[in-house]
Each structure stands twice: as structure tokens, then as C-alpha cells.
Amino acid sequence: MNTKENKFHEEITIERIACPMHVISLKKGLDDINQYEVLKVKTGSRNVGQELTSACIAMGHEVDATEEEDKTILYVQKI
């Protein structure tokens, strides 16, 4: 997946890790899109980005991440 050419279908922001709410928010965002569509997730820090990347991979989705300052933006393709 290439984020430079990626078009996303929905966008959400998850600022911090708050077990289990950050993963529930991610799952809700993924529920709002169809299979093979892309969810853009803006995070509050790199730690949140790493945590959510792991959750996406565990759920079987593809993830492409980019770093902006100390934050991470994820592009999650729902599989």
C-alpha cells in the first residue's frame, strides 16, 4: 500500500492510549468502511501509532504509517 497515492474513505483521530478505548475507537472506524477501503488514523504520539499498528496487524489489516513530528498517521486498509 502506498500512502502517497492513497485515497482514504474515513478519517479518525486517536490521541492517546486508554485501554481498551483506543482499540475500540479503531474498530469502530474500521466498521464504518467497507472491505479494501482505507481508514486514515491520526494519532497523538508515536507510542499510540505503534500500539494501533500492532492492533491492526493482529486483526489482519494492512497498515502503512508515516511520521509527522512526534505523531504518526496510519493508513489502514480493511481486509
Image (cartoon, rainbow, N blue to C red):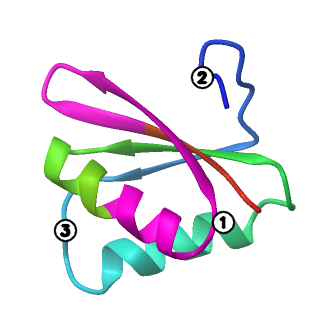
**Would you place residue 14 above or below residue 45 in this image?**
below
Which residue is the site of mark 2?
3
Q: Amino acid at mark 3?
A: Ile
Say which of 1 and 47 sits in front. 1
**Would you place residue 43 above or below residue 29 in this image?**
above
- Going 50% across and 64% down the picture, which residue do you hit? 57
| N-terminal label among 1 and 3 | 3
Q: Amino acid at mark 2?
A: Thr
Indicate left or right for 47 with 21 as reference.
left
| N-terminal label among 1 and 2 | 2
Which residue is the site of mark 1?
30
**Would you place residue 71 above or below residue 17 in this image?**
above
Q: Nearer the viewer, mark 1 or mark 2?
A: 2
- Residue 71 visible to an observer of this rendering: yes
Residue 41, position as x, y percentages in the image:
47, 46
SS assignment at label 2: loop
The quadrant where residue 21 appears: bottom left
Instruction: Give the CA separation, mark 1 to mark 2.
Output: 17 Å
**Numbered badge on residue 17:** 3
